Image (cartoon, rainbow, N blue to C red):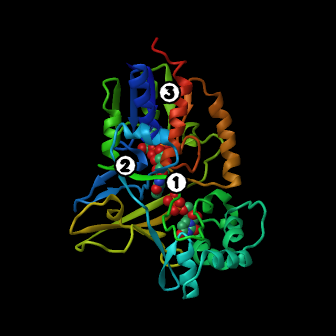
């Protein structure tokens, strides 16, 4: 039997931030267990055989509007500022994406202005006051033609659901602009940890009160550890033995390919809404700024989630949320356990949002878990 103050299940952002705070600010002994063979959860990065620093579970573009979250992580990493740029391949050519004035000019085949674009979109838009789903959120901004060109089939491929069956927040993540701002994301701070995510996580975990156990499943170790509190960051339905039925999750397959050339594509990411079975090709070197004579690209194939596989995305849709709400009731009744992070709260959260959630949970726990 081992003992500790806090037993943490999962070594992604949620588990790491809580371990770091509880150990460094409260002197609490934390055991953090992770069933994979590495730290970092889905934000893990590692050099491949060609020396390219790859995001192993899909591209992770760090961004935030929060100075507090940037400064907190900034204690453990320097930043490499990046303006994330992507393109979309449709109708036999590459388009500026997200939709902006440049896209509109490509469509017209001549120069234009923000005013003309706004006037035209006002004609194309389908008037919907409060969009209720991802189809409505896009057609209410740009109309059917651009929706069908860029969103409809990408979304069907990615989620195996029609955009009309998904919350507005899914496609609503993508900005529509009438100026020439061509960044994929709109948050004010956009940067990658200079030496990568894993290097940052290593520094966060480097504390004598943090004990890391890799290749260990929480379900197996739980009966062998005495602790005052548990932090669980795995899938919430798995925690409860699927007692209310499995939640719908979406998975992915990543297909890396190393090429003996410096660059493969003009930007970090090209989306393929209507062609191929993959959704996007990512050439991460564009973002990390690595200088190498070779490159590695990754094709990303959406996949069904099968038990025992990797649950990459919760599905933001009313039916899934209704089932999650029932699990949330069970979670709220679970004494001495905090459910934190993307899998445990079934939220399509970005990294900074998970950091924010973990910092808030730390503030809630701090007075309760003062060293005994
Ligand atoms: P995770 O990173 O999933 O970590 C949970 C960990 O718990 C995992 O390592 C898992 O193995 C472990 N675990 C689960 N159950 C158990 C158990 N029973 N015992 C032991 N260990 C267990 N965010 C952005 O901000 N920008 C992006 O560009 C971006 N791109 C993304 C692209 C893809 C393809 C995906 C899938 C996600 C992306 N994200 C992005 C989101 C980001 O990955 C998450 O916000 C973040 O990783 C969530 O951290 P977490 O700790 O909640 O979960
Ligand atoms: N999306 C789309 N076409 C695109 C890019 C995105 O329809 O070219 C939709 C799709 O439903 C996707 C969602 O917008 O799942 C969010 O895209 P994002 O790139 O933020 O997804 P993530 O990086 O989280 O997979």
Mark 3 or mark 2: whose residue is earlier in sequence: 2
Q: Quadrant of residue 243?
A: top right
Residue 153 pos. (x, y %): 59, 73
Q: Locate ligand 2 by image quadrant.
A: bottom right
Q: Is residue 297 visible?
A: yes
Q: Earlier in the sequence, mark 2 or mark 1?
A: 2
- Disc 2 secondary structure class: loop
Give me the disc on residue 187.
1
Side of 77 where 330 appears, left or right? right
C-alpha span from label 2 to label 1: 22 Å
Left or right, 276 with respect to 192, comes to: right
Labelled disc at residue 230: 3
Disc number lying in front (3 or 2): 2
Question: Is the CB atom of the residue marked by disc 2 within 8 angstroms of ligand 1's nearest atom?
Answer: yes
Question: How far apart, in angstroms, are the residues tagged by discs 1 and 3?
Answer: 33 Å
Residue lying furthest top in this view?
Answer: 372
- Residue at position x 57%, y 26% from top? 364
Q: Is mark 3 within 8 Å of ligand 1?
A: no
**Number of the front mark, 2 or 1:** 1
Front: mark 1 or 3: 1
Q: Between residues 58 and 178, which one lies in front from this camera angle? A: 178
Identify the residue shown where x is 39% and y is 70%. Answer: 267
Q: Which residue is mark 2?
A: 44
Question: In the rendering, at what x and y percent does residue 208 appear?
Answer: 30, 24
Disc 1 element? loop
Query: Badge 2: few (under 14), some or many (20 or more) residues near its Cα, within 10 Å?
Result: many
For marks 1 and 3 on the same chain, the one whose residue lies earlier in the sequence:
1
Distance of label 3 from label 2 (alpha carbons): 23 Å
Q: Nearer the viewer, residue 45 or 320?
A: 45
Respond yes or no on whether mark 1 lies under 8 Å from ligand 1: no
């Amino acid at each position: 039997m081992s003992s500790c103050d806090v037993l943490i299940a999962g070594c992604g952002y949620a588990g790491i931030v809580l371990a770091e705070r509880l150990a460094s600010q409260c002197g609490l002994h934390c055991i953090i267990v992770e069933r994979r063979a590495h730290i970092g959860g889905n934000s893990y990065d590692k050099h491949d055989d060609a020396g390219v620093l790859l995001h192993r579970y899909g591209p992770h573009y760090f961004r935030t509007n929060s100075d507090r979250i940037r400064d907190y992580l900034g204690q453990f990493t320097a930043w490499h500022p990046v303006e994330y740029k992507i393109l979309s391949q449709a109708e036999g050519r590459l388009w500026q994406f997200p939709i902006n004035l440049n896209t509109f000019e490509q469509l017209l085949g001549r120069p234009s202005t923000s005013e003309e674009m706004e006037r035209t979109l006002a004609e194309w838009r389908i008037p919907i006051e409060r969009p209720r789903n991802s189809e409505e959120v896009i057609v209410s901004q740009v109309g059917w033609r651009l929706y069908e060109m860029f969103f409809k089939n990408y979304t069907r491929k990615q989620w195996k659901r029609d955009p009309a069956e998904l919350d507005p927040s899914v496609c609503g993540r993508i900005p529509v602009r009438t100026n020439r701002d061509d960044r994929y994301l709109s948050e004010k701070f956009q940067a990658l940890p200079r030496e990568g995510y894993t290097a940052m996580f290593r520094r966060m975990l480097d504390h004598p009160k943090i004990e890391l156990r890799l290749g260990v499943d929480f379900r197996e170790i739980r009966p062998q550890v005495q602790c005052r509190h548990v932090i669980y960051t795995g899938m919430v339905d798995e925690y409860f033995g699927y007692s209310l039925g499995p939640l719908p999750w979406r998975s992915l397959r990543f297909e890396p390919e190393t090429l003996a050339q410096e660059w493969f594509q003009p930007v970090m990411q090209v989306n393929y809404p209507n062609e191929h079975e993959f959704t996007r090709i990512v050439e991460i070197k564009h973002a990390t700024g690595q200088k190498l004579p070779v490159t590695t690209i990754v094709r990303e194939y959406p996949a069904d989630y099968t038990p025992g596989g990797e649950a990459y995305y919760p599905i933001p849709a009313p039916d899934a949320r209704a089932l999650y709400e029932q699990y949330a009731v069970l979670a709220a009744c679970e004494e001495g356990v905090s459910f934190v992070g993307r899998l445990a709260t079934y939220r399509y959260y970005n990294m900074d949002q998970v950091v924010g959630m973990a910092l808030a949970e730390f503030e809630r726990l701090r007075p309760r878990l003062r060293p005994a």
